Image (cartoon, rainbow, N blue to C red):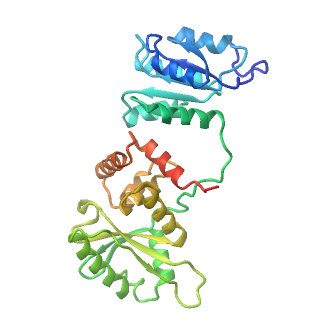
């Protein structure tokens, strides 16, 4: 097969290669009506020939992962071959568990969408891939999760991440940090908030000022839902943020109309799939994390965590 990135070939302004069963017409018709020039391929040889024979590479490839008479491994192999051209590839598939999603990304897919696809979202995604806009980077977590599990009856900190331990020592004098116990003002808030939560009240956080003379931000505490099997019966999970991060989580909750706990979960998922270590740092089992993400996706009206993260990144994009 010829070198797809040879100097004779340059990307065509609005040309797309759509790899899909030729009997499926609606999507191609919508793309043509939207002003794109399409090259259609319905099987492996025609897809390979389309890239090899074009005098100019397409700007983007749209690949349906359900080609006629082609098994999943062969589809992934074709995806890898198409992605090797350097052209962004958007895949469409009906089923995408974690293993299949990872296989698509490993094969070079730029975006993985689940069918049925909202055409407005697909067109917007194509436009972003063809004409990327240089914008300021999205704010993302700058450090691992700062969290701690606390026994409700006496404020004993059963477990802390190194980040939480550092923040507590910086904001509160001994003996509280040394003895791994919440200072009185934080423990009093914990007791009030626990009662409010049991009564069904909306979550409310706590923000404290730094010690006198210290040039630090304010520190916020949020009480988060967690699995008793992970953090222990009679315990609560506290997540700590300094001022900038707390503002970002609040902004995410407001922009997407999410409960604070869902905004917190989504914030820590930005950028990369959530490391399993961080799942436990948020007081969740892997099963509970997967369940929380499914519920969050339903709230946002998206199909998977990748689309939820895309919504979050857009919500945190600097304005203007």
Is 129 on the left-hand or right-hand side of 266? right
Is residue 254 among the parts visible in the rendering?
yes
Q: Nearer the viewer, residue 7 or 132?
A: 132
Which quarter of the picture shows residue 319? bottom right
Is 235 on the left-hand or right-hand side of 26? left
Q: Residue at x 23, y 80 (%)?
A: 153
Q: Position of residue 191 (x, y in %)?
A: 27, 80
Is residue 183 among the parts visible in the rendering?
no
Q: Relative to 97, is 182 above or below? A: below
Q: Residue furthest right?
A: 7
Is 96 on the left-hand or right-hand side of 211? left
Count numbered badges in the picture: 0
Q: Nearer the viewer, residue 86 or 297?
A: 297
Q: Nearer the viewer, residue 242 or 145?
A: 242
Quarter of the image where the N terminus is located:
top right
Q: Position of residue 150 (x, y in %)?
A: 31, 74
Q: Position of residue 147 (x, y in %)?
A: 40, 68
Q: Relative to 243, is 288 above or below? A: above
Is 153 on the left-hand or right-hand side of 244? left
Q: Nearer the viewer, residue 253 or 49?
A: 253
Quarter of the image where the C terminus is located:
bottom right
Q: Position of residue 60 (x, y in %)?
A: 61, 26
Q: Relative to 8, is 117 above or below? A: below
């Amino acid at each position: 097969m010829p070198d797809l990135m040879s100097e004779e070939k340059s990307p065509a302004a609005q040309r797309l290669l759509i790899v899909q069963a030729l009997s499926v017409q609606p999507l191609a018709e919508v793309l043509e009506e939207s002003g794109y020039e399409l090259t259609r391929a319905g099987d492996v040889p025609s897809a390979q020939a389309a890239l090899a024979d074009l005098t100019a590479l397409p700007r983007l490839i749209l690949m349906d992962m359900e080609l006629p008479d082609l098994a999943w491994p062969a589809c992934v192999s074709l995806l890898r071959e198409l992605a090797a051209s350097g052209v962004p590839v958007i895949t469409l598939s009906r089923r995408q568990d974690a293993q299949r999603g990872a296989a698509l990304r490993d094969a070079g897919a730029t975006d993985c969408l689940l069918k049925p696809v909202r055409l407005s979202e697909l067109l917007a995604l194509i436009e972003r891939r063809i004409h990327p806009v240089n914008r300021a980077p999205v704010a993302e977590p700058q450090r691992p999760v700062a969290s701690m599990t606390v026994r409700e009856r006496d404020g004993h900190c059963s477990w802390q991440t190194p980040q939480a331990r550092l923040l507590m020592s910086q904001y509160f004098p001994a003996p509280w940090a040394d003895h791994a116990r919440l200072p009185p003002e934080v423990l009093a808030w914990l007791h009030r908030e626990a009662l409010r939560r049991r009564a069904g009240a909306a979550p409310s956080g706590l923000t404290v000022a730094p010690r006198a003379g210290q040039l630090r931000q304010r520190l916020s505490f949020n009480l988060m839902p967690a699995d008793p099997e992970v953090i222990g019966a009679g315990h609560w999970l506290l997540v700590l943020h300094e001022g900038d991060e707390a503002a970002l989580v609040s902004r995410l909750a407001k922009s997407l109309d999410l409960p604070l706990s869902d905004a917190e979960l989504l914030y820590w998922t930005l950028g990369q799939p959530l490391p399993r270590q961080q799942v436990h740092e948020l007081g969740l089992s892997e099963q509970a994390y997967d369940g929380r993400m499914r519920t969050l996706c339903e709230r946002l009206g998206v199909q998977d965590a990748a689309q939820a993260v895309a919504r979050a990144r857009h919500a945190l994009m600097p304005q203007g």
